[in-house]
Amino acid sequence: MIMDSIEKALVFDGQVKVVAFKTTDLVNEAIKLHSLSPLAAEALGKVLTMAAYMSNELKGDKEKLSVQVTDKGVLGNIIVAADAGAKVRGYVQNKGATLPPLGNGKQDLFKGIGSDGFITVIKDLGLKDPYVGKTELARGNLEEDFAWYFTRSEGSPTALALDVTIGEDGTCVSAGGVLVQPMPNCPEHILVVVEDIVSNFANIGEVLRAKEPSDILKDYFGHFQIEYFPPTKPEYRCKCSVEQMANAVITLGRADSVNLLMERGEIEITCHFCGKKYVFGKQDVIDIWRRYDNKL
Ligand SMILES: [Zn+2]
């Protein structure tokens, strides 16, 4: 049993960053929470995995980010939010969408997502304005799309191997990847060596099923002046609360919330990210609007 973790290191005297990550448990948690089809599981699993990696790179505890993959494929939009330290949550619009699979536990993400949409990353770094990076989907398989996002939008040329393999029973067999980013001005002879190592990850799923992320770093990069960082455990964590869902009642508007109450006797709001249901009775709704009015 290989546990989820994100392992990061610098190699070649700090000239190349390498990160190996395993997110199988995280993807299985998402499958369970949302009852995802295999197609939705691979797509959301890959975006959750990349958001876990990206949020692990955030510097401050209060920093957070969101990743949106938007296009016209059968899955609809994929939305993931993450807090510093690889705490992620997310959902896919059409979680039951299916297409004929490609075989070997692989799904047709190209058709599932679409081929002319965007990856948008919004980072809240506690500054006045958030950082917004947006790139077009290059291939719709998410692996090359995220590599292109880092290269184009964040200015960090990136080699990325990304895998989410879904088994016959609909659960995730392996998820994770390896990311390699040479620093600016990394000498050519090092780039050549790095390219050669990266070619080992063409079948990243097999590598992930055989090795711990820490062993991936050690086995492939350990002999190149390596400096390890402490590992992180990625986790599925929703932050929804009664207060936040009360705001959703406000968003419904006064007339609609009253109409709903009359019709059903209560208002039920389900969190998109974790499926938790929040039920507001008549008195709750009255209180929500009273608090709202007092604040105005
Ligand atoms: Zn929630």
Image (cartoon, grey):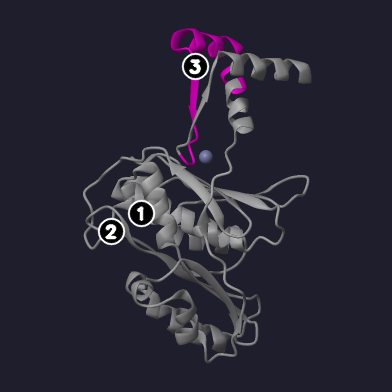
Towards the viewer: 144 or 85: 85
* 154 sits to left or right of 109: right
Q: Which residue is mark 3?
A: 266
Q: Which amino acid, mark 2?
A: Lys
Which residues make up the magenta segment?
A: 250-274
Q: Position of residue 268 (x, y in %)?
A: 48, 23
Give the foreground label among 2 and 3. Answer: 3
Query: Disc 3 on helix, strand or loop?
Result: loop
Is residue 8 shown above or below 248? below
Mark 2 is surrounded, within 10 Å at the Cα level, by few (under 14), some (14 to 19) or many (20 or more) other residues, namely some
Residue drawn 50% across and 85% down?
221
Determine if the C-beta at disc 2 is less than 8 A from ligand 1. Answer: no
- Residue occupying the point 49% across, 87% down: 193
Amino acid beneath label 3: Glu
Tell me whether circle 1 and circle 2 mark residues in contact (CB < 8 Å): yes
Tell me which corner region of the image, top left, top right, bottom left or bottom right, holds residue 284: top right
Whether the residue carrying mark 1 lies under 8 Å from ligand 1 is answered with: no
Which is nearer the N-term, disc 1 or disc 3? Answer: 1
User: Mark 1 or mark 2, which has the lower sequence index?
Assistant: 1
> Relative to 203, is 218 above or below?
below
| Residue 148 in the figure: left or right of residue 211 | right
